[in-house]
Amino acid sequence: MLSKKINRWVWILGPTIAVVAIPIFIAEYVLTHHALSKGRTELHDIAVTYVQRADDMIAEAITTMKKLKLKGTDNCSIENREAFGRASFESYYIQQVGLATNDGTLLCGEPMGSLISPVRLPATSTGDPSIMIGILSGQHADTQAAVTLRINDTTRLVARLSPKAISLEAGDPRLTGAMAVSVYLDDGSLWWERKSHSERILAPDVIVEKVRSESLPIRVIVAAPPEAMLASVAELSNFSIIGAVVTGIFTLLVGMWISWQQNDGSDEFSRAVSAQEFYPYYQPVVDIMTGKIAGCEVLVRWIRDDGTVVPPGAFLPYAEATGLIREITRQLMIKTVEDIGPLYKANPQLKVSINLTATHFDNADIVSEIRQTYYNSGIAYRQLMFEVTEQHPLRDLDLSQQIFKEIQAMGAKMALDDAGTGHGGLAYLQKLGFDIIKIDKMFIDHVCYDVTSETIVHSLHDIADRLGLSMIAEGVDATDQIRYLQNLGVEMAQGFIFSKPLPASEFVALVEAKANLMPDMPEEEEEVGEYAA
Ligand SMILES: Nc1nc2c(ncn2[C@@H]2O[C@@H]3COP(=O)(O)O[C@H]4[C@@H](O)[C@H](n5cnc6c(=O)[nH]c(N)nc65)O[C@@H]4COP(=O)(O)O[C@H]3[C@H]2O)c(=O)[nH]1
């Protein structure tokens, strides 16, 4: 029992955990992968933007200085200095333009008279020997680049570039907050740098993108920790977790509901079978010519712990589908020996009929079970009758025929139950060799009012007659039905008009009292039923 419970919980929790964990795992994997690859692309684009800015700044400085060179600005004359001031004023990137000696000694610069810091020349070559780029060093907090253009053997034009332009933010703020950017010249000198706010910027898994300028000696390195990239999918990730948890809760509830349903049926039912909670009730079969009890039909009842009586319609389909009906029938047969064995021993004319299902004819076990149960018991084989309904098809007619023969060989009788209501009736009669036909309540109910029902009952009686079979009418609950059956020549009947199915003690008492179950019959005024003669 405990292991079943554990098993059930494993079956509920297993899918639940899978439903929660697998989507989270897949979503996390996909989102992380997507965020990192998107972040890497963004970093690369940011690096390209910085390179582009640096390229643009330097290109503008070179163009400006080339124009000045064309004007012959090779000394620090007033006009030249005015031209330097105008050029720097007109450019967004250039902060100052001036003249320096080839070794970097400053001669003049505008605006502000002279360059703030000494230029260390020559610096990095641009590929064009007349143009050099270097980094100014000195007291000024900002690191600044200077581009120089050779005018003659002794003099160079110098343009000092503002760091403002290069330091403009580029990219998604979620990423750029944690991002570090460094702009280098080819000689390794640092032009500009932006520090990261994240302590993780030096971690080994930090993501780094490097981009070189195609035309100038500029390198940009951009780095950011992976967390900064994952921030962009944090909301989606939360959604996926919430979605998976909600689905998991739903799966858990469905699992518990299914388990509860199954538990309600299967476990409880199996337990009831093991606990032998199934009891035979006995419905008297009456000789309607005398009113005497000729025998009974065993009808199963499930009597639960709390005393409630469950009718067979509520559990037989399940018992048949699971095959548990075999065990139930076995228990019922044993109980009949205990319940009515002594009564039947004392009244050898009594018969008892027991219902079998199609499952009982899947193999021949039922034969040995009958033999073992009734051998030397109070109930002789010849007092037994077994009913087989025609509503559920027998799977193997040859095997069934064999089983019929073995049961009949013991002295027991075989009855076709619910005759006329199923599909196999006539074929069964022809193939299986029944001894008795039981007419279903469905037809008996209407015999005195409905010509079709009367025709069917009449025909069945005719068939039984011709085949030498006996007949028992079921579900008789009115005196005109009794009269009709008597007139037709049907001798045996059962029904609520005689008695409902009874617990063993009541049935035994009824027989021992030699009760006459025939109800008071009204005077026969006219013939009942179209066919009654
Ligand atoms: N309304 C009304 N009903 C009447 C009257 N006379 C008898 N009945 C009911 O009709 C059913 C007759 O049994 P059945 O045709 O073999 O039909 C049985 C039989 O096919 C099956 N069954 C009952 N006990 C067993 C069993 O132990 N084994 C198997 N395999 N089937 C069983 O369940 C069916 C229903 O059994 P029950 O509920 O006991 O219902 C019984 C009985 O209580 C009547 O005058 N009026």
Image: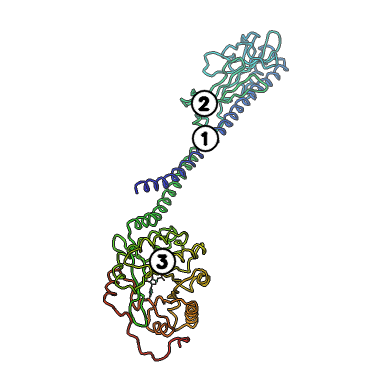
Secondary structure, mark 2, is: loop
**Mark 3 lies within 8 Å of ligand 1 (Cβ measured):** no
Where residue 142 appears, x then y in whole percent?
Answer: 53, 19
Q: In this view, does 67 lie to the left or right of 315?
A: right
State whether residue 471 is above or below residue 125.
below
Q: In this view, does 366 lie to the left or right of 167?
A: left
Residue 181 or residue 336, whichever sits in front = 336
Q: Dot 2, how many residues are within 10 Å of its Cα: few (below 14), some (14-19), or many (20+)? A: few
Of tags 1 and 2, the one toward the viewer is 1
Lower sequence index among marks 2 and 3 = 2
Report how far apart the C-alphas of labels 1 and 2 lie in the structure: 15 Å
Ligand 1 found in image quarter: bottom left
User: Which residue corresponds to mark 2?
Assistant: 206
User: Which residue corresponds to mark 1?
Assistant: 32
Marks 1 and 2: CB-CB under 8 Å? no
State whether residue 469 is above or below residue 75.
below
Q: Is residue 110 visible?
A: no
